[in-house]
Amino acid sequence: MRQQIKYLFITLFILSLSSCLHSRFIRKEIKHENITIQWYYYSYISNGSPDIIEVYDGSVSEIIFKGSDVVTGISVSNDTIIIKLFEPYRGIIYENLTKDKIFGYITKIDTTATLDDYRKIPDGKKESFFH
């Protein structure tokens, strides 16, 4: 009986640890003046995560958008961060925290992505923790 309980605890520990471990895949990264913008998602064992767009200014960061099956691109034009979406009404938008300005940049949503843009969504590249 003790042996079974020991194995049960070990199994539960491994399962809880593995649920915390996930790989981050970067679809696109843009460095512009003092900020870095990353468009990424996580790969979980059971399923994928939504696409996340996060803006970094040094060690400070803020997630400005999180959605599934809608983001087709990100870009920066002068002082504006543009998030391009394909038919956002059919996807799932978890967070749209775009504000008038983030770290001095205006954020805008562009809903004019085409089916061709959607088909060309870049695959994610596994983030390297050893830069």
Image (cartoon, helix red, strand yellow):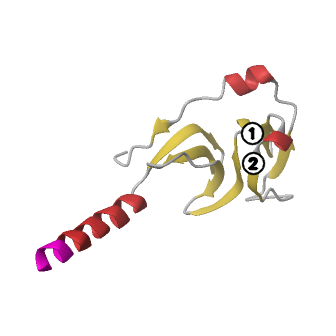
In percent of width and height, residue 48 lies at 55, 45
Going by the image, does 130 lie left or right of 35? left
Q: Amino acid at mark 2?
A: Ile
Q: Residue at x 60, y 29 (%)?
A: 122
The answer to whether residue 106 is above or below residue 118 is below
Please name whichever residue, 99 or 19, is drawn nearer the observer in this view of the structure: 19
Bin the neighbour count of mark 1 within 10 Å (Cα to Cα): few under 14, some 14-19, many 20 and up: many
Looking at the magenta stretch, what is its main secondary structure? helix
Q: Is residue 96 above or below residue 114?
A: below
* Farthest residue, direction top: 116
Q: Residue furthest bottom?
A: 2
Magenta-colored span: 1-6
Query: Label 1: which residue?
Result: 70
The residue indicated by pointer 2 is: 92
Q: Quadrant of residue 72?
A: top right
| Disc on the earlier residue, 2 or 1 | 1
- If the image is split into quadrants, where does the C terminus sit? top left
Residue 2 painted magenta: yes
Q: Is residue 1 left or right of residue 11?
A: left
Q: What secondary structure is marked by label 2?
A: strand
